[in-house]
Image (cartoon, coloured by chain):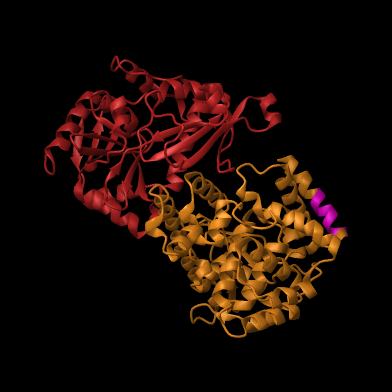
Chain colours: A orange, B red
Amino acid sequence: MGSMAESAPPLIRFLREPQSSVRFQRSDWEDLLRSARRGQLLARVARVAAMAGLTGKLPDKVNPHFQSALQIAQSHARSVAWETRQLRDALAGVEIPFVLLKGAAYIAANLEAGHGRLMSDIDIMVQRSALEPAEKSLIEHGWFPTKLDAYDQRYYRTWMHELPPLQHLERGTSLDVHHTILPPTASLKPDMEKLWQASLPAAGDPLVRVFAPVDMILHSAVHLFHDGDMRHGLRDLVDIDALIKQFSGTVGFWETFVQRAIEMDLTRPCHYALKYCRLWLATPIPDRVTAAVRQSGAPAAFAGGIMDRLLPASLGAVLEPDPGPRARLADFLMYVRSHYLRMPMHLLIPHLLRKRFARDER
Amino acid sequence: MARRLARRGVDLSVGSFTIRLRSNIPCVARGLELLYADYALGPAQELVDFEIRIHPPGVLRRWLRPQVTFSFEGHAPFKPLPRAQAFALFEWGLNWVIANNAHQYAIVHAATVEKSGRAVILPGMPGSGKSTLCAAMVCRGWRLLSDEMALISLQDGMLWPFPRPIGLKNASIDILRNYAETVVIGETVADTAKGTVAHMRPPRTSIDAARTPACARLLAFPTYKSGAPVEALPLGKAQALMRLVQNCFNYSVLGAAGFAALADTVDRCECLSIEYGNMARAIEILERRAMNGEHG
């Protein structure tokens, strides 16, 4: 899937140019509904359709699917608002500010990327020094660590950038508490203090924060291209596309973006994000920007060649009804890569072996 | 049929939905042939809403113990079940798909039937006897809307039909088998999570009218109690609403829109709870209440 012309799958054609759907055949709509559902993107598609003025032009059988998906997204947005309020109450007592990350941030800040965004769990970040008191207070308010063995506990706490996942006793909602955007074991070392300083109150509340626009995109790119969980890869790319479209109208946005990517040592994931947004979703990004990011962020030719084969297969897995061995292999290699980026070899190999072994035990 | 089902799949048109089912399991094909005999079985004339597969899980398990998995959009929400339960798994799985993906409706766990344009909603926890009651009413000339879920349109509050084979459990299977000569019941499967189960074929007239919605007039919460006399007690609107909410699958997804749809339903219905030991008598009462309108 090199270039994305008329031959692209209907979901991609729709995301690139919603108006193109007026020419869709029945089978195109079926394909779009299926891929979008697999990729957790149906509500987003419905939102984009509404914003593009397509509501009255959709086939009768498509309308209810969009309506249904939007109901789900609205319920997720209600849940995010409620959980945020609960988190604030739990952490305000110990005066710990927190940053909402990813979907929760887009929804809380009422960004376009948050409309039609589905959530599985809520991610927040607290300052490293606040991690212990935050955990204590969260437990007191009902968020308990999910059942993990001692190995997993140590893995999360020692090597990764988060507490073990928490789950609320009564509501069952999941919460991931991070203190950085990349684990301390990773070779890239973005300066967290800078992200904190630039962060903004989500809705006038100094304790509930979101990243500054440019940092939001950087974080989304890091998450997508470093975290190894490619199941929602296309959804994350769609997030980045929406953020770019919303923020890039501001004068000086791109200059700030490039400068920040370099300053934070995050040009590699940014390079991939911009490249695939442009290639797949036709996101408007000036040439000078892609060139500048490529210059400091593009991998060596050999690694780049491998990534150019893996990423499309992995990102595009949801577009196929039955992901073949190629997509599954690509997914697995992306998973290995994400760990390789996060951990040095002497930690990584025992970890992967253990995970492989533990999975077979079940 | 079996070959088409295994390859390109069979397109089932049920009410407002078209479902493509693919399966290489023989008892699924047999179930379809017997119980879905009166449905349009495609190829679909319109957009396929959902695609479902019933298939053996992994290669290994196939040899160890014959099992089947239900999958939807490449995702298997349930644990595999013994091969003999494949057809029931399709029915249960389809309920799950609708309950999780059709939020254009408020979806209530209830049997719904209609006569003379007046629909009855019979919500019920397992064991309330709602499916048995519903099957018997259908044998008495009521139109089957659904034995499992009331689909209440968020737009106009109408009840949308979703008529499918009626799920019967344990003693109900024989009760219905002997109830009327026209009754057709599929293969009986023992030892499922719900006990012994079988499905009853819905009447052709219900299937032919599956695109005609109905207006709810009676909301009755049934409780089966062996040997008890039939007793219908009026239920206050507020209490009826609370009980309807408890039986609503997607109430938390719908939020305010769900509240409005359920409140509207309670408003237009006479509400009662009915305890019964005698089915014929219970049906008589339900029929009278439904036909007499508001204060029958």
Q: Nearer the viewer, residue A39 or A359?
A: A39
Magenta portion: prevailing SS class: helix
User: Residue B284 appears at what percent x and percent y?
Assistant: 18, 28
From this view, report whether residue A294 is shown above or below residue B285.
below
From this view, report whether residue B245 is shown above or below residue A270.
above
Corner quadrant of residue A229: bottom right
Q: Nearer the viewer, residue A318 or A343?
A: A318
Q: Is residue A333 visible?
A: yes
Location of the C terminus of chain B by quadrant is top left
* Residue at horizontal 66 percent and vertical 55 percent from the top: A315
* Residue at horizontal 25 percent and vertical 33 percent from the top: B275
Q: Is residue A116 left or right of residue A353?
A: left
Corner quadrant of residue A186: bottom right
| Residue bounds of the magenta highlight | A346-353
User: Residue B17 appears at what percent x and percent y?
Assistant: 40, 40
User: Residue B230 appears at what percent x and percent y?
Assistant: 21, 30
Q: Is residue A132 visible?
A: no
* Residue at horizontal 42 percent and vertical 57 percent from the top: A71
User: Residue B114 appears at what percent x and percent y?
Assistant: 24, 35
Corner quadrant of residue B109: top left
